[in-house]
Amino acid sequence: MVGTPSAMGKPYRPKDHYFKKAKQEGLRARSAFKVDEILKRYPFLKKGATVLDLGAAPGGFLQILADAVGPNGRVIGVDIVAIRPFSQPYVKTAVLDVLADDFDAKLSALYDGPYDAVISDMAPKTSGIRTTDEARSLRLARKALELALTRGRPGSAFVAKLFMGGEFEEFRDEVRAGFEEVKLVRPEATRGASMEVYVVGLRRKAPPAPAPVAP
Ligand SMILES: C[S@@+](CC[C@H](N)C(=O)[O-])C[C@H]1O[C@@H](n2cnc3c(N)ncnc32)[C@H](O)[C@@H]1O
């Protein structure tokens, strides 16, 4: 089936190769292939690791993350939409809005960290107005970065999806300030028309030691 031509000239196929592959492999979403590719390129998640997945519904990323950390690990997934429960007891999910005032307290009640990786595939509801959508995407990515910096261990990793444009460069600099290395990934499974890119922060820098108290 030939889809509607996109702005970049590539056809948009709602039921494309990755959609079918996800179905065949029992994956909840085609996006699972995106995190799988990121983890293959940057294998920062070890068995036994603890990971926070923001914007986790319906759970494609969670399936890959659960496999990556195994039963001695821990995966926490949150979304404003309910996530069908996982059979693995080390995968915990909750309906939470990361932008809500009480989010941090509710996340702490779920699991207080620290995390080996904070991953965000959050995407705002699109308005069709490019600047508005970029700003909303950036707001979600900045919240994810705040969580990675406050709840990630030194040495931990960060991944956030972001719509290119607007303050993209500023955001990349903010990630650079907190992580030793920063990479940009546009996974194979990303649809042709999409402006999204994943910013990957590797090895969170240790926060500066507190100033010594004067005698
Ligand atoms: C592309 S989908 C995520 C797909 C998911 N990674 C998977 O593999 O199944 C983006 C998600 O971001 C969520 N989202 C958007 N705004 C959010 C917010 N403020 N708090 C939590 N989740 C949010 C949406 O509800 C949506 O489920």
Image: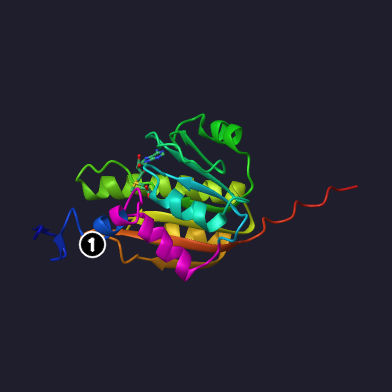
Task: In this rendered view, identify the residue nearer to me: 57 or 158.
Answer: 57
Query: What element does badge 1 sit on?
Result: helix
Q: Residue furthest right?
A: 215
Q: Residue 30 lies in magenta, yes or no?
A: yes
Q: Position of residue 194 (x, y in %)?
A: 25, 58
Residue 128, horizontal then vertical, whole percent? 19, 45
Examine the structure image and report whether residue 181 is included in the region drawn in magenta: no
Question: Image check: 107 left or right of 6?
Answer: right
**Which is more toward the observer, 64 or 128?**
64
So how many labels did they put on this image?
1
Mark 1, residues whose alpha carbon is within 10 Å: few (<14), some, or many (≥20)?
few
| Residue at numbered disc 1 | 17
Residue shown at 33% from the left, 50% from the top: 29
Amino acid under disc 1: His
Question: Can I make out residue 167 in this image?
Answer: no
In this view, 109 is above or below 139: above
The residue carrying mark 1 has its beta carbon less than 8 Å from ligand 1: no
